Image (spheres, helix red, strand yellow):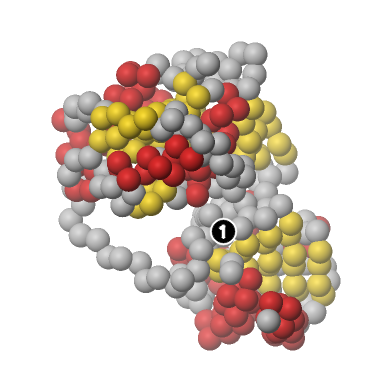
Amino acid sequence: MAEVLVYVDHVDGAVRKPTLELLTLARRIGEPVAVALGSGAENTAAALAEHGAVKVLTHDAAEYADYLVVPKVDALQAAYEAVSPAAVLVPSSAEGKEIAARLAVRIGSGIITDAVDLEAGAEGPVATQSAFAASYTTKSRISKGTPVITVKPNSAGVEAAPAAGTVEALAVSFSDKATGTKVTSRTPRESTGRPELTEAAIVVSGGRGVNGAENFSVIEGLADSLGAAVGASRAAVDAGWYPHTNQVGQTGKSVSPQLYIASGISGAIQHRAGMQTSKTIVAINKDAEAPIFDLVDYGVVGDLFEVVPQLTEEIKSRKG
């Protein structure tokens, strides 16, 4: 069976959920070979093997932390040349898409971004994407070179499938461009204790109807009762009510959780583009004609300041 390269997204050896989802998809089209780079790379082996990686290629060097994406592209290209895979899968984060695009240019291959599903085809892997703000679903395959595909988080379940997970050192020679852009400083993001927005199974978002930064505590309360991430519409972010890092939409982050709750969000196309692939969508809005209701599975016409606190208390009482 052909091998499939999977780029590993990890933090000091702790593998992030989107990578485990990629391993599930990779097993549909071949044998997953994981590529783990940077500090703690070798510590990823156990988790990767548990989820289907037959081999784990590792490499650590200061360049991965000190410079931007080029060193990682160099390493992934080295893995590609060593393995000759049937496909290369990368998590569809901002960094992941840049790495994938640079790799595709280097190896002369086509690229598919933001896939939401993957299946084996007679002429190579077939990727499913959502197009035109998720109004259409398309199926595509690469017709030139080795497919390079980025996959959105929450597109597949995490399934245990124990494999050998043999650890092998990857030989990497960095190009001259690897040290072209140096990271001069880092500021750790304040931890909220909530899940990462793009990876969360549940997202609770607030919009213009929240009517102020001080009122986002209502949205946060519901999110915390559900163990959810907090999102915000562009209107709320532009007004300064919530950080841009939490913006959901065409110019923010794309999410695809199991449950998406939109509170006080009208449903403009800009916002819908970032959340329309959510599995179940619930909207709370006092305007019965709001466009968001054309999209939802369940809609509540009412004042969010009355509905959301009641919902939060009901969830807490059931959990208690």
On the image, the x and y values in percent for residue 302 come to 80, 79
Among the 4 quarters of the image, the one containing residue 80: top left
Q: Give the vertical position of 91 relative to 250 (above or below).
A: above
**Residue 146 appears in the picture as rendered:** yes
Residue at the image position 73 percent from the left and 78 percent from the top:
318
Residue at the image position 68 percent from the left and 67 percent from the top:
262
Q: Give the vertical position of 261 relative to 67 (above or below).
A: below
On the image, the x and y values in percent for residue 250 come to 56, 52
Residue at the image position 35 percent from the left and 67 percent from the top:
189
- Circle 1 packing at 10 Å, graded few (<14), some (14-19), many (20+), is many
Relative to 10, is 50 on the left or the right? right
Residue that mark 1 sits on? 200
Relative to 217, is 137 on the left or the right? right
Q: Secondary structure at mark 1?
A: loop
On the image, the x and y values in percent for residue 234 come to 56, 65
Q: Mark 1 belongs to which amino acid?
A: Ala
Quadrant of the snapshot with the C terminus: bottom right
**Residue 76 appears in the picture as rendered:** no
Is 318 in front, or is 95? 318
Is 17 in front, or is 190? 17
Q: Total of numbered circles in the picture?
A: 1
Q: Give the vertical position of 262 relative to 121 (above or below).
A: below
Relative to 59, is 176 on the left or the right? left
On the image, the x and y values in percent for residue 227 come to 59, 69
Q: Give the vertical position of 234 relative to 120 (above or below).
A: below
Among the 4 quarters of the image, the one containing residue 75: top left
Residue at the image position 28 percent from the left and 47 percent from the top:
40
Relative to 292, is 273 on the left or the right? left
